[in-house]
């Protein structure tokens, strides 16, 4: 962490700010995905349960209609007469015709649902109605059926899809049966009234329900199952899974079961009031989450786009913060290296602007201080030079006048006159008209006057040469 804070500001912002924002984006994305997935599951479960409930009501209505017709027929005078062993042949014939007429009427009213109808009594009298195909055998063993089915207190039984053994045809076909056993093998009057229903009719109802892309409907009873034709083999439930469903007759709900290919299947079921069978909607869990899968990819694209946006914004933010700071840092380095022309002007109304204003003020202050120091130093040097000149001039003047006096005493008036001329010229050039700065030529003339005076004073003991490049 210490090394991070030693990096440039831009990198610090990117290394510290960007991971936090990216983590927040990913967490929000994951939360949104799981939240949406959970909502999809809840909504799908609710819709499936509602759909199964509607199909259950529909099937219950159909089955109750058939059940009511069967009960009414079994309680009709014609059937009761056929059950009585004391009835005459004429009464039996009238009852047979009446029973057949009732069966025919029922078939006409419910021909799409009813496949065939059958009645027989203990005496072997039969009434049958079957129009779909030419049967090769019709009938059943009443004692065997009474022996096999003896658990219902009202004698009513439902059989799920099975091969029709009562109306046997050249091509075996499957039916759903509801029948009523009247009496018992020991009673004086006994018989059976059986309605065979078209299993294809109920299968078509199940087929018309769209559960999911690979989902299907089932009609489950203790003795078997009826699946919609749209079921694919790989999504068929295992026998153990079906047995678990059979434990929930009379109730409704949802559970997860396995298919024969070990796929997780979501089963939503509802009981039918007429016979306690279960209507079940079966769908692969991946179908249930297919919408969530689409949402996942959409969310993934959005998260990636958001990450790119965050990276770009982070870079822009880092650059907007670090760029003026880098600019000020470079200007400070230049200023420290002696560049007094640098500018600290930054167009910002925040703390960086305050810092830039402070640096600009500091630059002005330092520049003024340096100028003041320079002026004071120049003034000090000038004063020292003037003081030195003032010290030199009286001695030089005194010595020169003394030399002139000596030349006059020696009656060397010409040399004395020349020395006076050079002395006057020396002081005239020294004054330089009050100027502080003179040309190099004037300064050389001034030096030459001084040296010429010294030459006159010391004669051959003093020699000089002025050598200055043009």
Image (tube, helix red, strand yellow):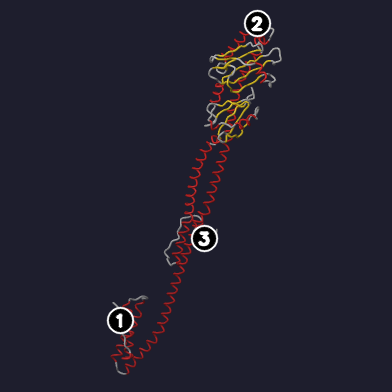
Mark closer to the chain start, 2 or 3: 3
Outermost residue, bottom direction? Answer: 410
Q: Pointer 2 and pointer 1: residues touching (CB < 8 Å)?
A: no
User: How far across and down, in percent of the image, does residue 255 sit?
Assistant: 61, 33
Tell us which disc is closer to us: 2 or 1: 2
Q: Pointer 3 and pointer 1: residues touching (CB < 8 Å)?
A: no
Mark closer to the chain start, 2 or 1: 2
Asked which secondary structure carries label 3, the reply is loop
Which mark, residue 240?
A: none
Image quadrant holding the N terminus, namely bottom right
- As drawn, is 244 to the left or to the right of 437? right
* Relative to 207, residue 68 above or below: above
Tell us which disc is closer to us: 3 or 1: 3
393, 417: nearer the viewer? 393
Asked which secondary structure carries label 1, the reply is loop
Cα separation between marks 3 and 1: 62 Å
Which residue in the structure is indicated by mark 1? 467
User: How far across and down, in percent of the image, does residue 361 sit?
Assistant: 48, 63
The residue positioned 51% from the left and 44% from the top of the image is 303
Cα separation between marks 2 and 3: 114 Å
Image quadrant holding the C terminus, namely bottom left
Which residue in the structure is indicated by mark 3? 6
The residue positioned 53% from the left and 19% from the top of the image is 171
48, 100: nearer the viewer? 100
The residue positioned 62% from the left and 8% from the top of the image is 96
User: How far across and down, in percent of the image, does residue 24 sit?
Assistant: 55, 47
Callout 1: few (<14), some (14-19), or many (20+) C-alpha neighbours within 10 Å?
A: few
Which mark, residue 91?
A: 2
* Relative to 349, residue 192 above or below: above
């Amino acid at each position: 962490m210490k090394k991070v804070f030693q990096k440039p500001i831009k990198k610090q912002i990117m290394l510290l700010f960007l991971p936090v924002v990216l983590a927040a984006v990913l967490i929000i994305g994951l939360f949104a995905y799981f939240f949406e997935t959970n909502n999809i599951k809840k909504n799908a479960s609710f819709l499936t349960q509602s759909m199964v409930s509607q199909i259950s009501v529909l099937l219950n209505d159909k089955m109750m209609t058939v059940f009511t017709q069967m009960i009414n027929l079994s309680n009709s005078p014609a059937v009761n007469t056929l059950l009585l062993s004391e009835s005459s042949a004429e009464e039996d014939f009238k009852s047979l015709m009446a029973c057949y007429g009732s069966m025919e009427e029922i078939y006409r009213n419910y021909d799409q649902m009813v496949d065939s109808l059958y009645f027989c009594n203990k005496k072997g009298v039969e009434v049958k109605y079957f129009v779909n195909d030419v049967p090769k055998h019709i009938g059943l063993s009443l004692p065997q059926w009474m022996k096999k089915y003896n658990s219902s207190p009202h004698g009513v039984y439902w059989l799920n899809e099975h091969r029709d053994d009562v109306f046997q045809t050249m091509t075996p076909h499957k039916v759903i049966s509801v029948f009523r056993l009247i009496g018992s093998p020991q009673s004086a009057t006994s018989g059976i009234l059986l309605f065979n229903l078209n299993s294809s009719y109920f299968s078509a109802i199940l087929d018309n329900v769209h559960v999911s892309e690979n989902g299907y409907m089932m009609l489950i009873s203790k003795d078997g199952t009826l699946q919609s034709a749209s079921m694919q083999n790989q999504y068929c439930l295992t026998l153990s899974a079906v047995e678990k469903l059979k434990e929930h007759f009379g109730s409704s709900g949802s559970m997860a079961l396995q298919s024969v290919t070990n796929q997780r299947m979501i089963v939503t079921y509802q009981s039918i009031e007429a016979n306690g069978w279960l209507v079940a909607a079966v769908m692969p869990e991946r179908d249930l989450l297919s919408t969530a899968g689409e949402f996942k990819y959409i969310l993934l694209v959005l998260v990636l786009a958001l990450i790119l946006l965050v990276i770009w914004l982070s870079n822009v933010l880092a650059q907007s913060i670090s760029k003026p700071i880098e600019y000020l840092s470079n200007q400070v380095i230049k200023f420290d290296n002696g560049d007094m022309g640098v500018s600290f002007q930054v167009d910002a109304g925040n703390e960086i602007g305050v810092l830039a204003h402070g640096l600009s003020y500091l630059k002005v202050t330092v520049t003024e201080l340096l100028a003041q120091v320079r002026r004071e130093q120049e003034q000090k040097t000038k004063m020292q030079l003037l003081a030195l000149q003032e010290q030199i001039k009286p001695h030089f003047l005194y010595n020169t006048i003394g030399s002139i006096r000596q030349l006059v005493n020696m009656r060397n008036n010409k040399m004395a006159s020349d020395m006076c001329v050079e002395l006057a010229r020396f002081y005239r050039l020294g004054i330089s008209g009050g100027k502080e700065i003179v040309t190099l030529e004037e300064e050389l003339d001034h030096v030459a006057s001084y040296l010429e005076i010294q030459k006159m004073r010391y004669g051959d003991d003093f020699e000089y040469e002025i050598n200055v490049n043009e």
